[in-house]
Amino acid sequence: MKGPQSRLIQKHMENRKYIFALFFVMSSLMVRGQDMNFIPFHYIGDYIKSFENMMQQRDGDILTTVYIGLDSGDPQLPPINVGDVFYKVSPSSLTITDSLFVADTAAPYYLFAQDPRGEGNIRANIEYIEESDSTFLRISHFTDDNLIINHDEDIVVPVCEGHAYDQWDGHMVDCWGDLIMKYYKDRPEGGYDCHVVRFDTDGTLKHEAVLPQSQNWIGGMKVYKESPLQYWQWKGIVDANLAIYVIDSLFQLNNTIIINKMLYEDPVEPIQERFVFDNSTCIVPDGDDVLVVGPYTRYEDFIVAETGLAVARYDIRTMQRKNLVKFDEWQGEHAEAWCDGFQKMSDGALYLLYTECMPNYTAEEIAIKIDPDFNVEWKRYCELAGKYNLGAAFCIPTKDSEMNEGMAITGSSIDLKTYQPGIFYFFLNHDGTVGVNDGGIEVRPYCFYPNPTQDMLRMQFSPDVQPKQIEFYDLQGRLVRTQSKAFKSIDMSQLPTGTYTLRVTMEDGKTYADKVVKE
């Protein structure tokens, strides 16, 4: 809400934290050309950072936008938006080749995409201008060569009178090359109306519709079918169901699909599994099927026995579940898991990126490639080396110079000693190998838990690798234990307490090293 935000910004301009925030953000732009596995920001105290947009340019570079804000100090008010930092990153050298800071007090929701009708890129957003008490669409253009935006050349067209609200994931470029923008407006009698508008890239309004109240505050909008053109939107609703709304090119409701939360329920035994439909739920169209990914929970005797992430395939016509694959890296009950990205590639393969968090706040980013039949081709466990901890992540599918598809991953991170926030980038190729990595990101085809451990160390391996040998070395570098078979469980009960180096050797000769603590 720009009015209250503008007043808060004026107030915070008197606050030195805001001035320091601008200074530190600007100083972070001086990292052009540096190694990119960990890009530090200065710690600012009341500090908020999130990744809002990511895309691949026609020249192959990755553009990422990071939202920088300050805590307003009032839980009833949104964060104070300092602005957005644009980074242009080379996947081949893992360096920042360009950067741009845009001071902006509006909500950080906008479309960021390749220009569908020309060269370069566009940045489009719905913005409220307090002086005229009107809401406008702003379209900015910039080239692949640099991130310079000349706002004097922006296309600014009226959307509505009064204040309209924007929402994350409410914009897209569809298969016709049109800009689809979604916004919300107060109703005189209370509540909100959800508007969807279609614009040409020159700002020409082509169509507008008001969606039914049932579709207010839904999480996203994607193309469902190109011919005839249909979109879909989704959200969790009462009674723990997932509602998918199919609308046509004129934004008229065609169908409502309800997916029940229950994945499995035995009427005799009190054992059941269920999806948890929340903000991290992702869906992807696949012919006459819908693919759904989200957190799941399994109960035994009405007690939580296991949590993790699940991917399910449903027949849209019958709503029958056709396939299901579950991911739980640490067996048993643990804190939570959430999806960071879910994409279908041109060959039908699925790329999944998710975070799994233990109750002790240990978290890992896990990247998985699944074939169309839901067989896992490879699984990679990713974390920052040393004293850094991964935070929220964001990913998109990318193509290398030979047009092989892969995954670009970015996210936030924290220095666990200084609590200094930062960001990270890395790239995974279609075969699960790391595109560019100087050691700042550790990507392994296995995981182990618990750590620290008192007796048994359990290990899980990606299906595309085969372990050959596991060794343990003490702090003096002496070999204290070797295991050449039965790698899923390793008995450490006879080892003295202390820190050991776990050395894993694969059949292909690759080796990995990790620290393990025996209590």
Image: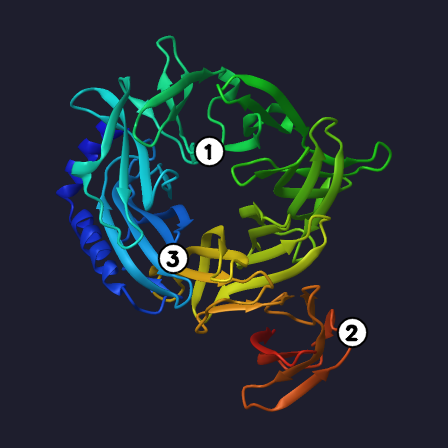
Tag 1: residue type?
Asp
Q: Position of residue 167 (x, y in %)?
A: 39, 31
- Quarter placement of the C terminus: bottom right
- Which residue is found at the position 19% from the left and 39% from the top? 151
Query: How far separated are the C-alphas under marks 2 and 3?
Result: 44 Å
Report the mark closest to the observer, 2 or 1: 1
Position above or below: 470 against 79: below
Pointers 3 and 1 in contact (C-beta within 8 Å): no
The answer to whether one can see residue 406 in this image is yes
What residue is at 35 percent from the left and 37 percent from the top?
110
Residue 10 percent across, percent down from the top left: 15, 36
Q: Earlier in the sequence, mark 2 or mark 3?
A: 3
Cα distance in 3D space between marks 2 and 1: 51 Å
Amino acid residing under circle 3:
Asp
Give the residue type that dot 2 points to: Ala
What residue is at 71 percent from the left and 84 percent from the top? 482
Which residue position is annotated with label 1? 174
Quadrant location of residue 323?
Answer: top right
Among the two numbered marks 3 and 1 on one chain, the one whose residue lies closer to the N terminus: 3
Residue density around tag 3, few if under 14, some if 14–19, many if 20 or more, within 10 Å: many
Name the element at disc 3.
loop
Q: Quadrant of residue 104?
A: top left
In the rendered image, the residue lying farthest to the left is 14
Q: Secondary structure at mark 2?
A: loop
Q: Residue pushed farthest right? A: 268
Residue annotated with mark 2: 486
Q: Is residue 120 left or right of residue 501?
A: left
**Residue 506 on image: x %, y %:** 67, 77
Is 438 drawn above or below residue 185 in the view shown? below
Disc 3: which residue: 61
